Amino acid sequence: MTIQIKSPGKPAEIDADAFLPTESGNFRIRVTVDDNGLEHCLVYTGDLTGENPPLIRIHSECLTGDAFGSLKCDCGPQLRASMERIQQEGHGAVVYLRQEGRGIGLNSKIKAYALQDCGYDTLDANLALGLPADGRTYGIAARMLKEAGVRKVRIMTNNPLKIQGLKDNGIEVVNRISHISGISVENLDYLKTKRERMGHILELE
């Protein structure tokens, strides 16, 4: 994605790719716009195209967890832990996808939260609203990685669907790294539901 800068001098084309210093270390951030106009981010550091496949995390947007520190989920701690681990590795990326609430959107997610307050688990709450348990897709993540020159990855995930989604879209996954963080009393049932009903690979005991 490029933008035109109008100035008294010569116009310049600027890529939507800039330096991003964070509490976890220094990154760059690149924006990709999908066919629906949603803006997704690749937050990366180091050489992604070297012989050693980069360490990546595919992270779906979670406003409540990422920004507000909600304890209903483990999203915020997972995001921060992945950025810190990538910095330790020296090269890698977080693919940040605008797929709030496992793809159902923020308003529907909060409605699902209300049902969870009444005793529904995270899967049945979505289904009770007539929505998919998980409506996310990963073609755009594969596209973003390919645009960065990446063809092989090591991925931090507990969700086999992310691995399959990358494979289906031409990215080779050479290794899966377990990524468990942020377990609390408030989200333990949520995590157990992901493990027992949604096929996530989670060692919680």
Image (cartoon, grey):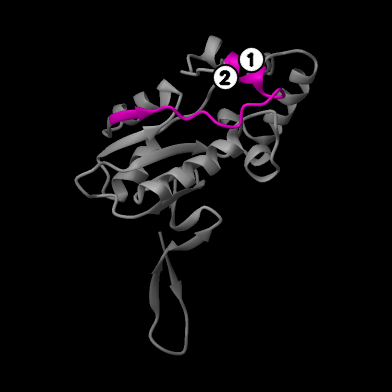
Q: Is residue 177 magenta?
A: yes
Q: Is residue 110 left or right of residue 94?
A: right
Q: Regarding mark 1 in the picture, which secondary structure is present there?
A: helix
Task: Report the magenta residues as a range.
Answer: 174-193
The residue located at (50%, 37%) in the rendering is: 59
Instruction: Give the residue pinned by disc 1.
Output: 127
Labelled disc at residue 132: 2
Q: Is residue 59 above or below residue 202?
A: below
- Position of residue 4 measured from the top left corner of the image (x, y, whole percent): 43, 72
- Position of residue 38 measured from the top left corner of the image (x, y, whole percent): 52, 46
Q: Is residue 182 left or right of residue 82?
A: right
Labelled disc at residue 157: none
The residue located at (30%, 37%) in the rendering is: 153
- Position of residue 52 measured from the top left corner of the image (x, y, whole percent): 23, 43
Q: Quadrant of residue 17?
A: bottom left
Residue furthest out toward the top? 196
* Residue nearest the viewer, comparing 184 with 42: 184
Question: Mark 2, residues whose alpha carbon is within 10 Å: few (<14), some, or many (≥20)?
Answer: some
* Number of marks in picture: 2
Quadrant (top left, top right, bottom left, bottom right) of the N terminus = bottom left
Q: Is residue 76 magenta?
A: no
Residue furthest out toward the left? 51
Quadrant (top left, top right, bottom left, bottom right) of the C terminus = top right
Three-letter code, disc 1: Leu
Q: CA distance from mark 1 to mark 2?
A: 6 Å
Three-letter code, disc 2: Pro
Visible in this render: residue 35? Answer: no
The residue located at (68%, 38%) in the rendering is: 64
Mark found first going from the N terminus, 1 or 2: 1
The residue located at (67%, 24%) in the rendering is: 187
Q: Quadrant of residue 138?
A: top left
